[in-house]
Image (spheres, rainbow, N blue to C red):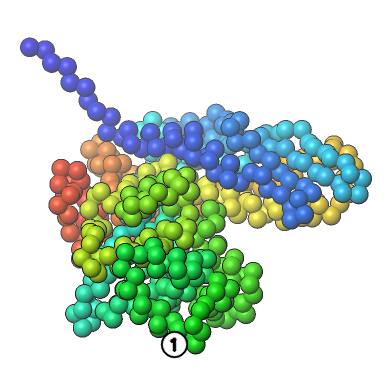
Amino acid sequence: MNTKFKLPDFIDIQRTSFLTFLEKGIVEEIEHLSPIQSQNGNIKLVFYPHLIKFKNPKPLPKEAILQSKTFSAALYVPAQLFVYNPITKIHLKSAIKNVFFGEIPFMTDRGTFIINGSPRVLVNQIVRSPGIYYKMQFDKENNKTFVGSIISNRGSWLRLEMDKEGFIYARMDKIRKIPIFILLYALGLTEKQVFTSIRYPQALNKSLMELVEESGVNTMDQKRALFKLHYILRPDRPPTAQSARQLLESRFMDPERYDLGKIGRTRINKKLKILGNPKRTTLGPEDILAAVDYLVNLKQGIGEIDDIDDLKNRRVRTAGELLQNQVRIGLSRLTRIVKEKLEKEGTKNRTEAKHLSPKRFINPKPLIGSLREFFGSSQLSQYMDETNPLAEITHKRRLSSLGPGGLSKDRAGLAVREIHPSHYGRICPIETPKVEMLD
């Protein structure tokens, strides 16, 4: 009996992720970048990310190894400059030109990158999936307490804590505790809205009484709450109404600085049973209020705590996503440089379009520097294990808990080092990320 057996592609995860990065990742990041304009809006630079081009990579992989060079391709992005002269009321625009953005290292068909003549592998990173997680813990006096953590793809962490007395606090990036009512009032919620939205409103009475005693005010409006929040987060700076509002909005409501991602938004909606907009990847007042309600319900025995080490609460960041993050960093640096140049150019009165050229404003160094830094010094960029072909495949399929956005060897506790039951049949207990952390 003849049976045909098709050998699976063991490094498909590497190649597929890099292809997704080239087709979608770079386009997404340039879309976020465009347009860049001066403060008065008189001059702006517009990019057309769907028309990007790559030159053929030179030198070829074998030549790159022999010549100790990097196997990469030049990235060109079409750009156009628009200028408005408020004195002459003339609108000018330049021709669309392909602008050199930098060299992007390319992956070979073996799933590796050739950097300065050496084959390197980008190890897949296993991290906590964005969303909201609740856990039970015991304080120094062995009292049971509950904590809820909202984890994002990018931006600040927010923790909601309930102590043994029943007081509820919020904590941003491990800074001082913020009484929960100060945060809720600062978000624009009223006392009536809070108490009518929570299943057990009596559980918040202690937190409200503490705020009244501390502030000496029976009713606190949004403006007072914002000033109080600013004082807690930035005690060294005098607050203004605008700076206090901007501080809160930049932490959780600015898509440029805070991003839950589609996965994070879906998980939060599912866990808290809310109908949040699936396209909105920032936090809103209703999300934080629902998170407080779930925390209070846990104290009453309603709801479930999460096992953060379970594979269903983890996700893999592949090579393409890691590179996309570096491109984002490089382009954010480029944005600052372009804005400075646009401000200088905006002071000049241009009357002819021939003086305008997008190439004058784009410097490829930030993007090249960001990628070179990542490939040269990141924990996830490693020299390929060339002991034998099996070691090579194993290295390309390895998972690591380390790296930016992950754990560090010094801080990783015992729980995360053990093999979790959900790993069996999915992650090899020999080549597991926990073993890698113990090296």
- Examine the rendered structure and indicate whether residue 358 appears above or below residue 140: above
Against 190, is 212 above or below? below
Query: Residue at the spot x=83%, y=39% of the render?
Result: 92
x and y percentages locating residue 278 in the rendered image:
43, 45
Query: Along the horizontal axis of the image, is 177 left or right of 72?
Result: left
Task: Tell which of 436 and 389 is nearer to you.
Answer: 436
In this rendering, does residue 319 appear at all? Answer: yes
Residue 125 shows in the view = no
Question: Which residue bears the numbered disc 1?
Answer: 213
Q: Note whether 352 is above or below 372 in the view shown.
A: above
Q: Left or right: where does residue 191 sit relative to residue 250?
A: left
From the viewer's perspective, is 297 left or right of 372? left
Find the residue positioned furthest to the right.
Answer: 88
Q: Residue at 77% across / 47% down in the picture? A: 43
Q: Residue at x 32, y 64 (%)?
A: 199
Query: What's under tag 1, amino acid-wise?
Result: Glu
Residue 6, position in %: x, y?
21, 22
**Residue at the far left in the pictured view:** 1
